[in-house]
Amino acid sequence: MKKAAIFQIIACIMVLNAAMVRAQDKVLMMATTTSTEDTGLLPVLADAFKKKSGVELRWVAVGTGKALEHGKACDVDVLMVHAPEAEKKFMDEGAGQDRTQIMYNDFVLVGPKADPMKVKGKSTAEALKAIAAGKGVFISRGDKSGTHMAELKLWKSAGMETPDKEEWYVSPGQGMLQALRMAAEKNGYALTDRGTWIKFEASPEGKDMAILVEGDKVLLNQYSVITLNTAACPKAKHDLAKQFAAWIASPEGQKVIADFKVMDKPLFFPNAGK
């Protein structure tokens, strides 16, 4: 093979390698929650962000507890989570750089339409006490997700220990949709974010289930974006993470959240800067 041809091949390889490196530089890896994936919000955000910035957003959807662990291990570049107390601890420990409030929805207590424990219309605390007293089946996420952490706090607020040793308290350690399916199968109750509920309610499995407790101020479900500490995670793509955090909190990003609906119902409500 002639030297000119060899040099041409080498040059092509170098160009391709450089292009691959540049493409990889434009990828932002995020750890987020199952609720943002199950509802279908993530692809919508990713598409809008890429059109604006040219950055490809990829993610791993897990419980908030696991997402924060990914952040501490520097496995990702940015976080989008919904467990304010755990997030505060994460920031206090120096693992996070900035935390930006972006949107909220609320938790709801759902169960069989027949409501065997008669909790409909009660406060959250009264409903949990009634379920415990009647030994009604309760499905807990059990996965250290934001929803699971909120549920544990609600038992405590009701003046009760978490009933994790009781037979009627089932803790599969799975995502929200899986927990809702199990609640439907077992004629049981569950705490869920409203967004995932709207998605589940429209499925055949949700036809015999209903929201029984809602509107209680303790059921607020706040989401935030966290960028990682540059010193703790020097290899993370901090510039892209800051760019995403700024975009999703901007009027453009907030409108994408506000416009996102399932069954013509809004699932999340933007509240950046509030």
Image: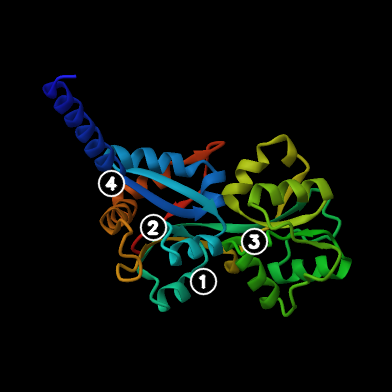
Residue 220, compared with residue 253, is above or below; it is: below
* Secondary-structure class at tag 2: strand
The residue that appears at 82% across and 69% down in the rendered structure is 132
Residue 132, compared with residue 213, is above or below; it is: below
Q: Which residue is mark 1?
A: 86
Q: Nearer the viewer, mark 4 or mark 3?
A: 4
What amino acid type is highlighted by mark number 1? Ala
Q: Nearer the viewer, residue 242 or 192?
A: 242
Q: Which residue is mark 3?
A: 143
Circle 1 crowding by C-alpha within 10 Å: few under 14, some 14–19, many from 20: some
Distance from the alpha carbon under mark 4 to that under mark 2: 14 Å
Residue 37, compared with residue 157, is above or below; it is: above
The label shown at residue 249 is none
Q: Which residue is mark 2?
A: 78
Q: Which residue is mark 4?
A: 25
What amino acid type is highlighted by mark number 3? Asp
Image position of 86 (left or right of 110): left
Image position of 52 (left or right of 155): left
Q: Nearer the viewer, residue 130 or 153?
A: 153
Circle 3 crowding by C-alpha within 10 Å: few under 14, some 14–19, many from 20: many
